[in-house]
Amino acid sequence: MHRPGIADLCFLDLPAGESCIQKALDDGSEFTHARTILQGGNRLNLAESGGIGSDPIFPGLTGSFPCGTIGPMPETVILHGHPFEAEYIEDSAEWALGFDWRFAEWRCRDALVDHGAQTLYTGQRYDPSKVELVRGGWKHDHCAICWWTLWETEDPESGTGYTDGIDWLCVECYEKLVLPRLTERD
């Protein structure tokens, strides 16, 4: 099962003082990316943290976004220079142990396109009269733990990772979080 990524609700224009996390919980969303609550305040300001392009997950974002904090600041783990809630990262690393990961260069893969919506093509049956198969149409993936973008590039930080054939882990998450747990098991 593929783990969902970032709760988009954290970047909605919420009324002042409304917690994006509480909004996500109220709406029944699963909040799996806690970096936004680890900024030490009620607003995440990308201009203060490096501005446009400083966020590997949302490189085009700028400005302030409402994001409340809930209770004391949780323990954090730093990945790609950004803090993540340690409990979430630990749970995700444990989840990753259930798969066989192999190192690979990320390459564009085929995609099924239906009215603009894309799905990774993995050999499943489809109706060509309704869905278009686009060779090389799947242009990126995200690390299943930290949501780092993996894409076809010569940069090893973004162009290589570990895959189980469907999902991907960035090198940093695999080597910092998964590999030590695998070594402990042996």
Image: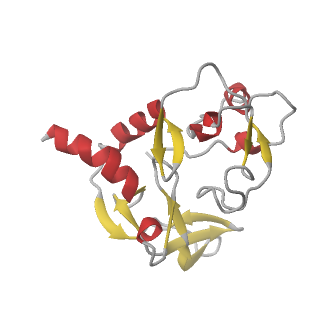
Residue at image coords 64%, 39%: 36
89 or 82, which is in the foreground? 82
75 or 8, which is in the foreground? 75
- In the visual, does 186 lie left or right of 146? left
The single residue placed furthest to the right in the displayed view is 15
In this rendering, the answer to whether 109 lies above or below 46 is below
In this rendering, the answer to whether 61 lies above or below 105 is above
Q: Quadrant location of residue 112?
A: bottom right
Q: Quadrant of the N terminus?
A: top left
- In the visual, does 163 lie left or right of 141? left
Q: Quadrant location of residue 91?
A: top left
In this rendering, the answer to whether 179 lies above or below 184 is below
The percent coordinates of residue 72 (x first, y second) are: 59, 20
The percent coordinates of residue 104 (x first, y second) are: 33, 69
Residue at image coords 49%, 48%: 146
The percent coordinates of residue 178 (x first, y second) are: 31, 46
The percent coordinates of residue 53 (x first, y second) are: 66, 63
The single residue placed furthest to the top in the displayed view is 71
Residue at image coords 74%, 44%: 11
- In the visual, does 62 lie left or right of 99? right
The single residue placed furthest to the left in the displayed view is 186
141 or 146, which is in the foreground? 146
